[in-house]
Amino acid sequence: MMIGKFTQQGDSYEGSLYALGLSLRIVRFSPVPAKQGNGPDFVVLGETGGVTFDLGAAWAKTSKAGKAYLSVKLDGPTLAQPINGALTKQQDGSYALVWSRDARKDDDQVAA
């Protein structure tokens, strides 16, 4: 399910997030200036009412088909649990943030 739409602005991505209990008109993926080890490549920032806050992190990845994307994890006090997703380039040049369910958790719940 697509939960956001973004455009690339230099090394950053800017857009909106609108699903899963969140509605933010300003969301920014900003590059981490000094990545360390397995740390994220981007910090995800939200903005509302002139206040900027941490919303999550993203890691640069490459799919099996050789396409670049960002693996995204959003988390915060307003979310019941973290949101996993991917920021992928679309045919029109925009970027879609697509929510994905963690299948491992679903399997654990079925087995319980």
Image (cartoon, rainbow, N blue to C red):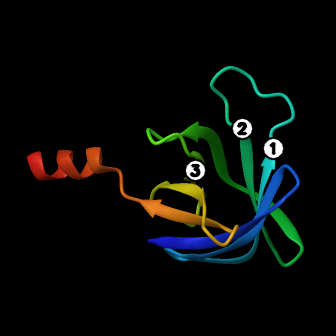
Q: Are marks 1 and 2 in contact (CB under 8 Å)?
A: yes
Percent position of residue 5, x then y: 65, 72
Q: Which residue is mark 1?
A: 31
Q: Gap between marks 1 and 2, in whole Å?
A: 6 Å
Q: Nearer the viewer, residue 16 or 68?
A: 68
Q: Which residue is mark 3?
A: 72
Percent position of residue 63, x then y: 49, 41
* Residue at 78% from the left image edge and 65% from the top image edge: 14
Q: State the image quarter where residue 92 is shown.
A: bottom right
Which three-letter amino acid code belongs to the residue tagged 3? Val
Q: State the image quarter where residue 88 is shown.
A: bottom right
User: Is residue 98 depicted above or below 73 in this figure?
Assistant: below
Which three-letter amino acid code belongs to the residue tagged 2? Asp
Earlier along the polypeptide chain: callout 2 or callout 3?
Answer: 2
Earlier along the polypeptide chain: callout 1 or callout 2?
Answer: 1
Q: Does 80 sit left or right of 107 as displayed?
A: right
Percent position of residue 71, x then y: 56, 46
Whether residue 44 is visible: yes
* Residue at 70% from the left image edge and 67% from the top image edge: 93
| Residue at disc 3, secondary structure | strand
Which three-letter amino acid code belongs to the residue tagged 1? Pro
Percent position of residue 110, x then y: 12, 52
User: Is residue 41 depicted above or below 99 in this figure?
Assistant: above
Q: Nearer the viewer, residue 21 or 41?
A: 41
Q: Residues within 10 Å of mark 2 (few under 14, many from 20)?
A: many
Assign the N terminus to one quadrant of the image.
bottom left
| Residue at disc 2, secondary structure | loop
Q: Which residue is mark 2?
A: 41
Q: State the image quarter where residue 87 is shown.
A: bottom right
